[in-house]
Image (cartoon, rainbow, N blue to C red):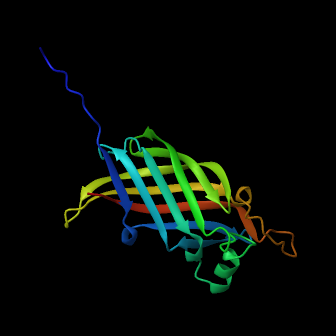
């Protein structure tokens, strides 16, 4: 009697390599220049089937609001205040991936739920998969470039002012950009 073999998928866990990753945002100031900010403290964990990124069973990103940096202490303090992120009551930004879909080649879309300031909305970001390599220390790493846009007002970040000429000080659209390197976990 022939036995039938069942192939069991092995889920592989991945964690962020913080020294080779960065998370930034860009926002128009006075509608004439762009200010760039970073989250210095963040975490990304992913789980994939068989260690490949053709699908992702789980992707979770968190950022510590108190780690925000725009290279201006006064502006950073304002961003942490109740006018913007309200870090005292909402210290974490969280994105939980719900679907990872191939567009073409190495281009993917990652759909998920983004929570900022206690408000959760569906968001889709573009993901360019850079590949998987083994580094000189024997660690398996995967690289990604992530980009997208959100409306800050949809997440309760509604503070604004108007110039004498009638222009807004801070645009509603926030551009997101991340360079991410994940390390395969043993």
Q: Residue at x 79, y 70 (%)?
A: 160
Q: Residue at x 78, y 69 (%)?
A: 159
Is residue 10 positioned above or below 16 on the image? above
Q: Residue at x 63, y 85 (%)?
A: 73
**Coordinates of residue 179 in the picture (x, y in percent):** 44, 62
Could you tell whether 85 is left or right of 184 in the image?
right
Is residue 86 positioned above or below 71 on the image? above
**Coordinates of residue 175 in the picture (x, y in percent):** 60, 60
**Coordinates of residue 52 in the picture (x, y in percent):** 32, 45
25, 18: nearer the viewer: 18
Q: Residue at x 29, y 53 (%)?
A: 132
Q: Image quadrant for the N terminus? A: top left
Q: Residue furthest top?
A: 1
Q: Residue furthest bottom?
A: 73
- Image quarter of residue 16: bottom left
Q: Image quadrant for the C terminus? A: bottom left
């Amino acid at each position: 009697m022939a036995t039938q073999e069942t192939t069991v998928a092995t889920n592989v866990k991945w964690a962020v390599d913080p020294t080779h990753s960065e998370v930034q945002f860009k926002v128009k100031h006075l509608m004439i220049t762009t200010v760039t900010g970073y989250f210095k403290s963040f975490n990304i964990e992913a789980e994939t089937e068989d260690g490949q990124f053709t699908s992702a069973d789980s992707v979770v990103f968190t950022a510590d609001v108190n780690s925000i940096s725009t290279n201006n202490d006064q502006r950073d303090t304002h961003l942490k205040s109740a006018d913007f992120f309200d870090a005292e009551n909402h210290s974490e930004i969280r994105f939980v991936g719900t679907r990872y879909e191939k567009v073409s080649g190495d281009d993917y879309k990652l759909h998920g739920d983004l929570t900022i300031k206690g408000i959760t909305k569906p968001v889709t970001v573009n993901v360019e998969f850079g590949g998987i390599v083994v580094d000189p220390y024997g660690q398996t790493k995967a690289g990604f470039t992530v980009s997208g846009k959100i409306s800050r007002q949809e997440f309760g970040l509604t503070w604004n002012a108007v110039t004498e000429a009638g222009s807004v000080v801070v645009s509603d659209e926030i551009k997101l950009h991340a360079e991410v390197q994940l390390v395969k976990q043993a």
